[in-house]
Amino acid sequence: MLLKEINDSQFNMWRAIVALVHADGHKHSDEDRFLKETFAKLPFSDQQLEILSEDMSQVKKVDDFYPQISDPGDRSQFIYFARLLFWSDGDFHHQEEAILQSFRQQTLDKANLQEVMKSVDAIAEDFAKQENERGFRQKLADFVGRFFE
């Protein structure tokens, strides 16, 4: 499936990945090449490419972009690419592991919260539907019945 354009969530995912390249203090030529080749294949706007180019030359914080990755799929993809980048230099540093674990946890926390909210919304909709289907006499009988329990 080809993307027609890069949305805000995806764009922030890539900005976070670029920032991640700088996180260990060592920007490797393989990482730089990977990013440039990937950016050439994706439908970024000219403005987005300009911003990414600036990000590649200036150190940015991952935390500036990660919260703006709104789509759970994009967050998962970020974790995947982060792992690839961390292993690309052949040495998975303790700092890199801590960073990756932190983002994994944030991704899981957000995903779980979204699932819980979906479940709560579904339960509330089912309850409202059942209540709307019940007649006045049934509701009144339930109300009166509370006094005789």
Image: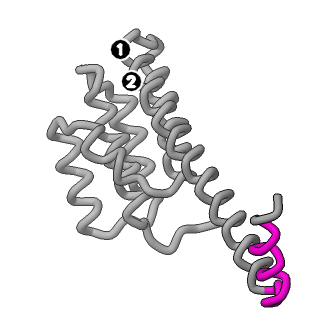
Q: Which quadrant, please, contains the N terminus? A: bottom right
* Image coordinates for residue 138, horizontal then vertical, percent: 84, 82
Pointer 2 with pointer 1, Cβ within 8 A:
yes
Magenta stretch, main secondary structure class = helix
Residue neighbourhood size for the residue with mark 2, other residues' Cα within 10 Å, grouped as few (<14), some (14–19), many (≥20)? some
Residue at image mark 1: 95
Q: Which residues are magenta?
A: 133-146
Q: CA distance from mark 2 to mark 1?
A: 6 Å
* Image coordinates for residue 51, horizontal then vertical, percent: 21, 57
Residue 41, disc: none
Q: Nearer the viewer, residue 104 or 42?
A: 104
Mark 1: secondary structure: helix
Asked whether residue 124 is drawn in magenta, I would say: no
Is residue 36 shown left or right of residue 56? right
**At 35% from the left edge and 53% from the top edge, which residue is drawn?**
68
Kindly identify the amino acid type of the residue bearing the numbered disc 1.
Gln
Identify whether 139 is placed above or below 83.
Answer: below
* Image coordinates for residue 33, horizontal then vertical, percent: 37, 38
Residue 99, disc: 2
**At 28% from the left edge and 60% from the top edge, which residue is drawn?**
49
Mark 2: secondary structure: helix
Tell how many labels. 2
* Image coordinates for residue 135, horizontal then vertical, percent: 82, 89
